[in-house]
């Protein structure tokens, strides 16, 4: 059953994530054809999610986990913008950049998620 605390946590995390994404997009505009801003957002969002999953795996703080994972990371990361960037690169016939951006985003996202989650889990096992 969803309660008002869960809804509030997702809402507040979502607002924070959206504002963080907007701030990064304003501070780091894309340079050349490579969308560095979206890449940075998606990779750091994967790291944040990995840290949250690793940290809260055995924690009773489900509200905070919802705020960070579903709220913040859900609003912060930008799969829709990522898709638009890929389509724009294809439209502009930037095929090498398209393939390198697509593969490095997916690979780095998965890698940083795993490493972040694993680092928290190994610290917990050692303490």
Image (tube, helix red, strand yellow):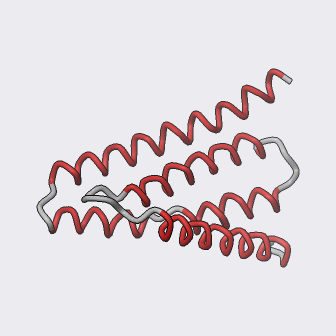
From the viewer's side, name the closer residue of 110 and 43: 43
User: Residue 5 sits in which quadrant?
Assistant: bottom right
Horizontal and vertical percent position of residue 121: 73, 31
On the picture, is 6 further left or further right than 96?
A: right
Q: Position of residue 105 (x, y in %)?
A: 39, 48
Where 64 sits versus 47, above or below?
below
Q: Position of residue 29 (x, y in %)?
A: 40, 65
- Relative to 78, 118 lies left or right: right
**Front-lying residue, 88 or 36:** 36
Q: Residue at 31% across / 65% down in the picture? A: 85
Q: Position of residue 102 (x, y in %)?
A: 31, 51
Q: Decide: is 71 above or below 95.
A: below
- Residue at 82% over, 62% down: 63
Q: Is residue 81 left or right of residue 124?
A: left
Choose between 3 and 65: the one closer to the eye. Answer: 65
Quarter of the rendering occupied by the C terminus: top right
User: In the picture shown, does residue 119 fall above or below 73?
Assistant: above
Q: Residue furthest left?
A: 93
The N terminus sits in image quarter: bottom right
Task: Count numbered badges in the picture.
Answer: 0
* Residue 76 placement: quadrant: bottom right
Q: Which one is nearer the viewer's eye here, 100 or 71? A: 100
- Residue ID at (48%, 68%): 25
- Residue 21 sits in quarter: bottom right
Q: Residue furthest bottom?
A: 4
């Amino acid at each position: 059953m969803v309660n008002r605390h869960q809804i509030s946590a997702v809402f507040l995390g979502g607002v924070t994530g959206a504002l963080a994404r907007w701030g990064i997009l304003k501070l780091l505009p894309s340079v050349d054809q490579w969308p560095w801003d979206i890449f940075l957002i998606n990779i750091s969002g994967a790291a944040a999610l990995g840290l949250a999953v690793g940290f809260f795996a055995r924690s009773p703080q489900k509200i905070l986990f919802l705020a960070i994972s579903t709220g913040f990371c859900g609003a912060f990361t930008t799969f829709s913008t990522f898709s638009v960037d890929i389509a724009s690169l294809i439209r502009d016939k930037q095929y090498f950049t398209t393939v390198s951006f697509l593969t490095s985003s997916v690979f780095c996202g998965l890698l940083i998620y795993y490493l972040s989650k694993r680092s928290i889990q190994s610290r917990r096992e050692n303490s």
